[in-house]
Protein backbone atom coordinates (compact mmCIF):
# COMPACT_ATOMS: atom_id res chain seq x y z
CA UNK A 1 0.00 0.00 0.00
CA UNK A 2 1.32 3.48 -0.84
CA UNK A 3 2.21 5.27 2.39
CA UNK A 4 3.84 8.44 1.05
CA UNK A 5 1.24 11.18 0.30
CA UNK A 6 3.54 12.62 -2.36
CA UNK A 7 3.85 9.24 -4.06
CA UNK A 8 0.09 8.80 -3.93
CA UNK A 9 -0.54 12.20 -5.51
CA UNK A 10 2.05 11.47 -8.18
CA UNK A 11 0.37 8.17 -8.99
CA UNK A 12 -3.13 9.71 -9.17
CA UNK A 13 -2.04 12.63 -11.39
CA UNK A 14 -0.13 10.32 -13.74
CA UNK A 15 -3.08 7.94 -14.05
CA UNK A 16 -5.49 10.81 -14.68
CA UNK A 17 -3.38 12.28 -17.50
CA UNK A 18 -2.95 8.89 -19.13
CA UNK A 19 -6.66 8.08 -18.80
CA UNK A 20 -7.72 11.33 -20.47
CA UNK A 21 -5.39 10.89 -23.44
CA UNK A 22 -5.79 7.18 -24.13
CA UNK A 23 -9.05 7.20 -26.22
CA UNK A 24 -7.49 9.66 -28.68
CA UNK A 25 -4.59 7.36 -29.50
CA UNK A 26 -6.12 3.89 -29.19
CA UNK A 27 -8.23 1.89 -31.59
CA UNK A 28 -11.90 1.20 -30.87
CA UNK A 29 -11.21 -2.35 -29.70
CA UNK A 30 -8.66 -1.14 -27.16
CA UNK A 31 -11.05 1.53 -25.89
CA UNK A 32 -13.68 -1.18 -25.54
CA UNK A 33 -11.33 -3.18 -23.30
CA UNK A 34 -10.66 -0.13 -21.16
CA UNK A 35 -14.40 0.36 -20.69
CA UNK A 36 -14.60 -3.17 -19.29
CA UNK A 37 -11.56 -2.45 -17.12
CA UNK A 38 -13.49 0.48 -15.67
CA UNK A 39 -16.52 -1.71 -14.99
CA UNK A 40 -14.27 -4.29 -13.33
CA UNK A 41 -12.73 -1.54 -11.22
CA UNK A 42 -16.15 -0.62 -9.83
CA UNK A 43 -17.05 -4.24 -9.04
CA UNK A 44 -13.55 -5.00 -7.76
CA UNK A 45 -13.65 -1.99 -5.45
CA UNK A 46 -16.53 -3.56 -3.55
CA UNK A 47 -14.64 -6.85 -3.20
CA UNK A 48 -11.50 -4.94 -2.20
CA UNK A 49 -13.24 -3.10 0.64
CA UNK A 50 -14.40 -6.42 2.04
CA UNK A 51 -11.09 -8.21 1.59
CA UNK A 52 -8.57 -5.48 2.36
CA UNK A 53 -10.39 -3.58 5.08
CA UNK A 54 -12.58 -6.26 6.68
CA UNK A 55 -10.70 -9.48 5.89
CA UNK A 56 -13.75 -11.04 4.20
CA UNK A 57 -13.43 -13.19 1.07
CA UNK A 58 -16.48 -12.56 -1.13
CA UNK A 59 -17.20 -15.01 -3.95
CA UNK A 60 -20.71 -13.76 -4.64
CA UNK A 61 -19.98 -10.47 -6.41
CA UNK A 62 -21.08 -11.86 -9.79
CA UNK A 63 -24.51 -12.44 -8.24
CA UNK A 64 -24.97 -8.72 -7.59
CA UNK A 65 -23.30 -7.86 -10.90
CA UNK A 66 -25.98 -9.99 -12.57
CA UNK A 67 -28.83 -8.57 -10.49
CA UNK A 68 -27.87 -5.07 -11.54
CA UNK A 69 -27.69 -6.09 -15.20
CA UNK A 70 -30.96 -8.02 -15.26
CA UNK A 71 -32.86 -5.42 -13.24
CA UNK A 72 -32.01 -2.60 -15.63
CA UNK A 73 -32.52 -4.88 -18.67
CA UNK A 74 -35.98 -6.02 -17.58
CA UNK A 75 -37.10 -2.57 -16.46
CA UNK A 76 -36.01 -0.82 -19.66
CA UNK A 77 -36.90 -3.47 -22.25
CA UNK A 78 -40.04 -5.02 -20.74
CA UNK A 79 -41.41 -2.23 -18.56
CA UNK A 80 -40.20 0.69 -20.65
CA UNK A 81 -38.60 2.55 -17.74
CA UNK A 82 -35.70 4.96 -18.15
CA UNK A 83 -32.15 3.59 -17.91
CA UNK A 84 -31.34 5.64 -14.80
CA UNK A 85 -34.42 4.25 -13.05
CA UNK A 86 -33.34 0.74 -14.02
CA UNK A 87 -29.86 1.32 -12.63
CA UNK A 88 -31.26 2.58 -9.32
CA UNK A 89 -33.61 -0.40 -9.17
CA UNK A 90 -30.72 -2.83 -9.64
CA UNK A 91 -28.70 -1.17 -6.87
CA UNK A 92 -31.63 -1.17 -4.45
CA UNK A 93 -32.49 -4.82 -5.09
CA UNK A 94 -28.86 -5.86 -4.68
CA UNK A 95 -28.45 -3.98 -1.42
CA UNK A 96 -31.67 -5.47 -0.01
CA UNK A 97 -30.66 -9.01 -1.00
CA UNK A 98 -27.15 -8.45 0.40
CA UNK A 99 -28.67 -7.41 3.73
CA UNK A 100 -31.02 -10.39 3.78
CA UNK A 101 -28.32 -12.98 3.07
CA UNK A 102 -25.57 -11.07 4.86
CA UNK A 103 -27.26 -11.02 8.26
CA UNK A 104 -27.01 -14.83 8.67
CA UNK A 105 -23.94 -15.51 6.48
CA UNK A 106 -21.69 -12.87 8.00
CA UNK A 107 -21.84 -14.55 11.38
CA UNK A 108 -19.51 -17.11 9.83
CA UNK A 109 -15.76 -16.56 9.58
CA UNK A 110 -12.78 -17.61 7.49
CA UNK A 111 -13.18 -20.46 5.03
CA UNK A 112 -16.75 -21.11 6.14
CA UNK A 113 -17.77 -17.59 5.13
CA UNK A 114 -15.93 -17.87 1.81
CA UNK A 115 -17.75 -21.13 1.06
CA UNK A 116 -21.06 -19.57 2.06
CA UNK A 117 -20.60 -16.68 -0.39
CA UNK A 118 -19.55 -19.19 -3.06
CA UNK A 119 -22.78 -21.09 -2.44
CA UNK A 120 -24.79 -17.86 -2.69
CA UNK A 121 -23.16 -17.03 -6.00
CA UNK A 122 -23.83 -20.54 -7.33
CA UNK A 123 -27.49 -20.38 -6.29
CA UNK A 124 -27.77 -17.01 -8.00
CA UNK A 125 -26.46 -18.46 -11.26
CA UNK A 126 -29.08 -21.23 -11.06
CA UNK A 127 -31.82 -18.65 -10.61
CA UNK A 128 -30.53 -16.70 -13.61
CA UNK A 129 -30.85 -19.89 -15.67
CA UNK A 130 -34.21 -21.04 -14.37
CA UNK A 131 -36.13 -17.77 -14.13
CA UNK A 132 -36.37 -17.39 -17.88
CA UNK A 133 -39.56 -15.31 -17.55
CA UNK A 134 -37.38 -12.64 -15.97
CA UNK A 135 -33.89 -13.20 -17.32
CA UNK A 136 -34.57 -14.82 -20.68
CA UNK A 137 -32.73 -17.94 -19.51
CA UNK A 138 -30.03 -19.06 -21.92
CA UNK A 139 -31.32 -16.63 -24.57
CA UNK A 140 -30.77 -13.58 -22.38
CA UNK A 141 -32.26 -10.13 -22.91
CA UNK A 142 -31.31 -7.94 -25.85
CA UNK A 143 -32.36 -4.67 -27.42
CA UNK A 144 -31.52 -2.51 -24.42
CA UNK A 145 -31.49 1.26 -24.97
CA UNK A 146 -28.25 3.18 -24.68
CA UNK A 147 -27.70 5.06 -21.46
CA UNK A 148 -28.73 8.71 -21.71
CA UNK A 149 -28.09 11.43 -19.13
CA UNK A 150 -29.45 14.97 -19.50
CA UNK A 151 -30.13 14.35 -23.18
CA UNK A 152 -26.59 13.11 -23.91
CA UNK A 153 -26.49 9.51 -25.14
CA UNK A 154 -23.52 7.29 -24.36
CA UNK A 155 -23.76 5.09 -27.44
CA UNK A 156 -20.08 4.72 -28.42
CA UNK A 157 -17.06 3.23 -26.63
CA UNK A 158 -15.43 6.68 -26.71
CA UNK A 159 -18.31 8.31 -24.82
CA UNK A 160 -18.89 5.40 -22.46
CA UNK A 161 -15.19 5.33 -21.60
CA UNK A 162 -15.29 8.81 -20.09
CA UNK A 163 -18.57 8.11 -18.29
CA UNK A 164 -17.29 4.91 -16.67
CA UNK A 165 -13.94 6.32 -15.63
CA UNK A 166 -15.53 9.49 -14.26
CA UNK A 167 -17.71 7.26 -12.08
CA UNK A 168 -14.61 5.26 -11.11
CA UNK A 169 -12.82 8.45 -10.04
CA UNK A 170 -15.73 9.60 -7.87
CA UNK A 171 -16.15 6.18 -6.27
CA UNK A 172 -12.44 5.84 -5.52
CA UNK A 173 -12.36 9.26 -3.86
CA UNK A 174 -15.38 8.37 -1.73
CA UNK A 175 -13.93 4.95 -0.86
CA UNK A 176 -10.59 6.51 0.05
CA UNK A 177 -12.35 8.97 2.38
CA UNK A 178 -14.29 6.09 3.91
CA UNK A 179 -11.15 4.08 4.55
CA UNK A 180 -9.27 7.05 6.01
CA UNK A 181 -12.16 8.02 8.30
CA UNK A 182 -13.55 6.49 11.47
CA UNK A 183 -15.40 3.69 9.63
CA UNK A 184 -12.09 2.66 8.08
CA UNK A 185 -10.44 2.54 11.49
CA UNK A 186 -13.27 0.39 12.78
CA UNK A 187 -13.01 -1.97 9.81
CA UNK A 188 -9.26 -2.40 10.22
CA UNK A 189 -9.60 -2.95 13.95
CA UNK A 190 -12.24 -5.58 13.24
CA UNK A 191 -10.00 -7.20 10.62
CA UNK A 192 -6.88 -7.31 12.80
CA UNK A 193 -8.48 -8.24 16.11
CA UNK A 194 -12.19 -8.79 16.59
CA UNK A 195 -11.99 -8.88 20.43
CA UNK A 196 -10.10 -5.57 20.46
CA UNK A 197 -12.68 -4.04 18.11
CA UNK A 198 -15.48 -5.15 20.42
CA UNK A 199 -13.73 -3.51 23.35
CA UNK A 200 -13.69 -0.30 21.29
CA UNK A 201 -17.51 -0.59 20.96
CA UNK A 202 -17.43 -1.65 17.30
CA UNK A 203 -20.53 -3.63 16.34
CA UNK A 204 -18.68 -6.17 14.24
CA UNK A 205 -21.66 -7.91 12.67
CA UNK A 206 -23.39 -4.65 11.80
CA UNK A 207 -20.21 -3.24 10.25
CA UNK A 208 -19.57 -6.37 8.20
CA UNK A 209 -23.17 -6.37 6.96
CA UNK A 210 -23.04 -2.69 5.96
CA UNK A 211 -19.82 -3.12 3.96
CA UNK A 212 -21.21 -6.27 2.34
CA UNK A 213 -24.28 -4.29 1.25
CA UNK A 214 -22.05 -1.49 -0.03
CA UNK A 215 -20.01 -4.02 -2.00
CA UNK A 216 -23.23 -5.46 -3.47
CA UNK A 217 -24.35 -1.99 -4.53
CA UNK A 218 -21.07 -1.38 -6.33
CA UNK A 219 -21.37 -4.73 -8.07
CA UNK A 220 -24.92 -3.90 -9.18
CA UNK A 221 -23.83 -0.50 -10.49
CA UNK A 222 -21.09 -2.16 -12.56
CA UNK A 223 -23.55 -4.76 -13.85
CA UNK A 224 -26.12 -2.13 -14.82
CA UNK A 225 -23.54 -0.11 -16.73
CA UNK A 226 -22.33 -3.30 -18.41
CA UNK A 227 -25.89 -4.07 -19.55
CA UNK A 228 -26.37 -0.65 -21.13
CA UNK A 229 -22.97 -0.75 -22.76
CA UNK A 230 -23.32 -4.20 -24.31
CA UNK A 231 -27.12 -3.78 -24.88
CA UNK A 232 -27.41 -7.54 -24.24
CA UNK A 233 -27.16 -9.65 -21.10
CA UNK A 234 -26.99 -13.41 -20.68
CA UNK A 235 -26.27 -15.73 -17.79
CA UNK A 236 -22.77 -16.62 -19.07
CA UNK A 237 -21.56 -13.22 -17.85
CA UNK A 238 -22.56 -13.82 -14.22
CA UNK A 239 -21.09 -17.16 -13.25
CA UNK A 240 -18.88 -17.93 -10.24
CA UNK A 241 -15.87 -17.63 -12.55
CA UNK A 242 -16.67 -13.93 -12.83
CA UNK A 243 -16.69 -13.67 -9.03
CA UNK A 244 -13.22 -15.22 -8.95
CA UNK A 245 -12.01 -12.61 -11.45
CA UNK A 246 -13.44 -9.85 -9.25
CA UNK A 247 -11.64 -11.36 -6.26
CA UNK A 248 -8.36 -11.47 -8.17
CA UNK A 249 -8.49 -7.70 -8.73
CA UNK A 250 -7.73 -6.64 -5.12
CA UNK A 251 -5.41 -9.62 -4.63
CA UNK A 252 -3.26 -8.55 -7.57
CA UNK A 253 -3.60 -4.87 -6.82
CA UNK A 254 -2.83 -5.06 -3.13
CA UNK A 255 -5.92 -5.75 -1.07
CA UNK A 256 -5.44 -2.82 1.31
CA UNK A 257 -5.02 -0.21 -1.42
CA UNK A 258 -8.09 1.64 -2.70
CA UNK A 259 -6.42 3.32 -5.68
CA UNK A 260 -4.55 0.13 -6.49
CA UNK A 261 -7.80 -1.45 -7.67
CA UNK A 262 -7.20 0.23 -11.04
CA UNK A 263 -3.99 -1.66 -11.99
CA UNK A 264 -5.59 -4.84 -10.68
CA UNK A 265 -8.59 -4.40 -12.98
CA UNK A 266 -6.35 -3.51 -15.91
CA UNK A 267 -4.32 -6.66 -15.27
CA UNK A 268 -7.27 -9.09 -15.32
CA UNK A 269 -8.78 -7.32 -18.34
CA UNK A 270 -5.82 -6.67 -20.61
CA UNK A 271 -3.36 -9.48 -19.85
CA UNK A 272 -5.71 -12.34 -20.91
CA UNK A 273 -6.39 -10.44 -24.14
CA UNK A 274 -2.66 -10.04 -24.80
CA UNK A 275 -2.09 -13.75 -24.13
CA UNK A 276 -4.94 -14.87 -26.40
CA UNK A 277 -2.47 -15.28 -29.26
CA UNK A 278 -0.88 -18.25 -27.46
CA UNK A 279 -4.01 -20.36 -28.02
CA UNK A 280 -4.81 -23.03 -25.47
CA UNK A 281 -1.71 -22.13 -23.44
CA UNK A 282 -2.97 -18.64 -22.57
CA UNK A 283 -4.72 -19.74 -19.37
CA UNK A 284 -1.59 -21.49 -18.12
CA UNK A 285 0.51 -18.41 -18.91
CA UNK A 286 -1.97 -16.19 -17.10
CA UNK A 287 -1.77 -18.46 -14.05
CA UNK A 288 2.03 -18.31 -14.11
CA UNK A 289 1.90 -14.51 -14.24
CA UNK A 290 -0.43 -14.47 -11.24
CA UNK A 291 1.99 -16.62 -9.26
CA UNK A 292 4.90 -14.36 -10.22
CA UNK A 293 3.01 -11.26 -9.11
CA UNK A 294 2.20 -12.81 -5.74
CA UNK A 295 5.80 -13.94 -5.21
CA UNK A 296 7.73 -10.90 -6.41
CA UNK A 297 5.24 -8.13 -5.61
CA UNK A 298 3.66 -9.32 -2.34
CA UNK A 299 2.13 -5.92 -1.61
CA UNK A 300 0.44 -5.88 -5.02
CA UNK A 301 0.87 -3.85 -8.16
CA UNK A 302 -0.13 -0.72 -6.25
CA UNK A 303 3.10 -0.95 -4.29
CA UNK A 304 5.32 -0.59 -7.36
CA UNK A 305 5.02 3.24 -7.74
CA UNK A 306 5.83 3.72 -4.05
CA UNK A 307 8.91 1.51 -4.40
CA UNK A 308 10.08 3.42 -7.47
CA UNK A 309 9.44 6.78 -5.81
CA UNK A 310 11.35 5.71 -2.69
CA UNK A 311 14.24 4.43 -4.77
CA UNK A 312 14.67 7.48 -7.02
CA UNK A 313 13.86 10.04 -4.31
CA UNK A 314 16.87 8.97 -2.28
Image (cartoon, grey):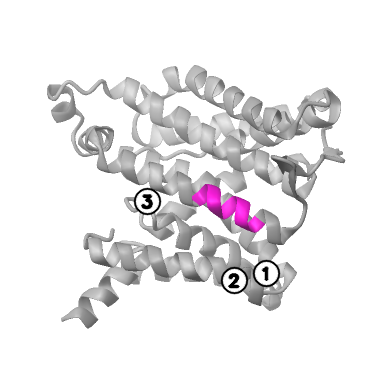
SS of the residue under disc 1: helix
Q: Is residue 194 visible?
A: yes
Write down the residue under mark 2. 22
Instruction: Indicate the position of residue 199 as horizontal and vertical percent values.
Output: 12, 23
Residue 163 covered by magenta stretch: yes
At horizontal 32% and vertical 37% (from top left) the residue drawn is: 54
Range drawn in magenta: 161-168
Q: CA distance from mark 1 to mark 3?
A: 25 Å
Q: Residues within 10 Å of mark 2 (few under 14, many from 20)?
A: some
Q: CA distance from mark 2 to mark 1?
A: 9 Å
Q: Residues within 10 Å of mark 1 (few under 14, many from 20)?
A: some
At horizontal 52% and vertical 65% (from top left) the residue drawn is: 267
SS of the residue under disc 2: helix
Tag 2 near tag 3, CB within 8 Å? no
Instruction: Indicate the position of residue 28 as horizontal and vertical percent values.
Output: 74, 69
Write down the residue under mark 1. 30
Task: Tell me the quarter of the picture where residue 14 sits.
Answer: bottom left
Q: CA distance from mark 2 to mark 3?
A: 22 Å
Of residues 146 and 314, which is closer to you in this image?
A: 146
Instruction: Indicate the position of residue 164 as horizontal and vertical percent values.
Output: 60, 51
Write down the residue under mark 3. 258
246 over 31 or under it: above or below: above
Tag 2 near tag 1, CB within 8 Å? yes
Label located before the other in sequence (2 or 1): 2
At horizontal 83% and vertical 23% (from top left) the residue drawn is: 79
Amino acid sequence: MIKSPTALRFQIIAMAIIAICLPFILQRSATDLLVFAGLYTIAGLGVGLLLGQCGIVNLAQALFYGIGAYATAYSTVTLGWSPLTGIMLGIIISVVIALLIGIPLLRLHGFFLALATLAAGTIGTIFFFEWDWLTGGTLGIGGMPSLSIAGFTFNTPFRFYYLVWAIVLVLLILANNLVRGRPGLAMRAMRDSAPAAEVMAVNIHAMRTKIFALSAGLGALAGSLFAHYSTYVSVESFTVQRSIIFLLIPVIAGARSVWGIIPGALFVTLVPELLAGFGDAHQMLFGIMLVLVVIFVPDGLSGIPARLYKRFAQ
